[in-house]
Amino acid sequence: MASWRPTLASPWTRPDMERVLEDALRVLAEIGVECRQPVMVERLAARFGSYAEPRVRFDPKRVRAHLEATRARALKGAAGADDVEFSLGGCWAGINYCDPETQAVRPARSDECAQMCRLWDARDLAGVVPVVPGDVPPEIQTLAAERIALKNSRRLGGCLPVLDAEEARYLIEMNLAAGRRYVLAEQICISPLRFNDRGIETALAFLEDPDVEVALWGFIPMAGASCPLDPRSAIVQAVAEELAHSMAGDALGFPQSGLELGVSPFDFQYGLIVFGSPEWCLYRTLAVQMGAFLNAGRPVRRGAFRSTAKQPDEQAACERTATVLWQALLGARRFGAVGQLSVDEVFSPQQAVIDREILAYVARLLRGMEVERDADSVALIGEGVAQGSFAGVADTVERFRAFCTFPELFRRWNVERWRADREPTILGEAWARAKEEIGRSAHRLPPDPEKKIDAIYSKAVEHVRAR
């Protein structure tokens, strides 16, 4: 018995990738990374190279040694991990909400933000809230979103922008009142090849704080804008930047367990980053192959739904299915950016349900099929001909449940059956299922922690308004 599963062939050989790495090491040694934050400069220069204002330049041998240590951590982290199951994650916090009743794209009310947190809570997700409240002033959105997350979910919160250390301390206190640990995310890297001194300053303020988890986010190279349009050169810069990001984490005491590459195209018509285009898929192919190479052959299992569509419409269906299928063929199994549209500006609960159906489609395709069985094909055909149908032959009866998929949302009925069921729409069905999920979230904070969070929130709002 032989099984076949579809895959994509990667474009580069191992010597090709070694040459890309060599060029990335040259970029770090000859061009370097701009940095003016004194602690970062001192630590990077001492461990990895030298400093001539305003750029740190990295010694290739030391970078190689760091890469080998990172590869060892990646392999250790992979021990015993099950990377083959398809799964859905969360998304980044949308600044807009696609109203499931009207399809209007607008800021979310606080009660809608709470409702979407419960949708994620029903899925047992951690991480950032799916949408921020748009009925509060922008300067307190992070505080308001955190309070909503703590009250309406077991694990959501953290990671949204914080403008000063005092605001972060209030967020830490709110989490402690709920019995949680705050996640402070700082974007410490800016493409091309520059460290974000302000983000580093904030991260350093909490270096020794046991009540906060600090996440250092890396570069976002955009082909044709913040990195070269040329695909190979774009990956060379992405490798150099990710190595610099990783070394910065080590220097600050936040070592990474692996290296993550990404390059997204720039749209020359509208002047924006592009998610979900054919070019995005092509750049992703190189990033995935190079990422596995940097991580000692460990497959890149993280993927994401990608689209620039503003609503759960035909464009979203095309781009999201294409990008998820493409990434799955490259080895991705855990998919984020669920329900996330317009790059990351819009959240749609209907899209979050449709994404599950898309992933089920892709998972079935990637499971493949048996192409050689120990069966007498002539006899099997003869049996079906004799019965006048193959629906009742033993082979069909025994195998159809395992072989076929039965979608919950994308039902395959004919027009007569559809009309008999009152002509349901995909978006209507998706919103009904989302509401069912939301109803399964039973999280409630006890009264005392809730009062403490409200009191801390009020003080934090006063601080932000005075700032």
Image (tube, helix red, strand yellow):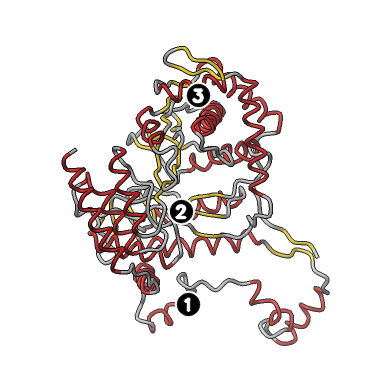
The percent coordinates of residue 403 (x first, y second) are: 65, 71
The percent coordinates of residue 91 (x first, y second) are: 41, 53
Q: Which of the two discs, 2 and 1, labels the residue nearer the N terminus?
A: 2
Secondary structure of the residue carrying numbered label 3: helix
Q: Tag 1: Cα neighbours inside 10 Å, few (<14), some, or many (≥20)?
A: few
The percent coordinates of residue 166 (x first, y second) are: 28, 40
Secondary structure of the residue carrying numbered label 2: helix
Label for residue 320? 2
Asked if labels 2 and 3 touch by Cβ distance under 8 angstroms, the answer is: no
**Badge nearest the viewer, 3 or 2:** 3
* Residue 416 vs residue 310, the one in the foreground: 310
**Badge nearest the viewer, 2 or 1:** 2
Q: CA distance from mark 2 to mark 1?
A: 24 Å
Give the residue displayed 37% in from the left and 33% down from the top. Answer: 199
Q: Amino acid at mark 1?
A: Trp
Q: Which of the two discs, 3 and 2, labels the residue nearer the N terminus?
A: 3
* Residue 234 appears in the picture as rendered: no
Q: Is residue 141 above or below residue 432?
A: above
Q: Amino acid at mark 3?
A: Arg
Q: Is residue 454 left or right of residue 265?
A: left
The percent coordinates of residue 23 (x first, y second) are: 60, 22
* Residue 204 vs residue 403, the one in the foreground: 204
Label for residue 43? 3
Q: CA distance from mark 3 to mark 2?
A: 42 Å
Q: Which residue is mark 1?
A: 413
Give the residue displayed 38% in from the left and 69% down from the top. Answer: 430
Image quarter of the N terminus: bottom right
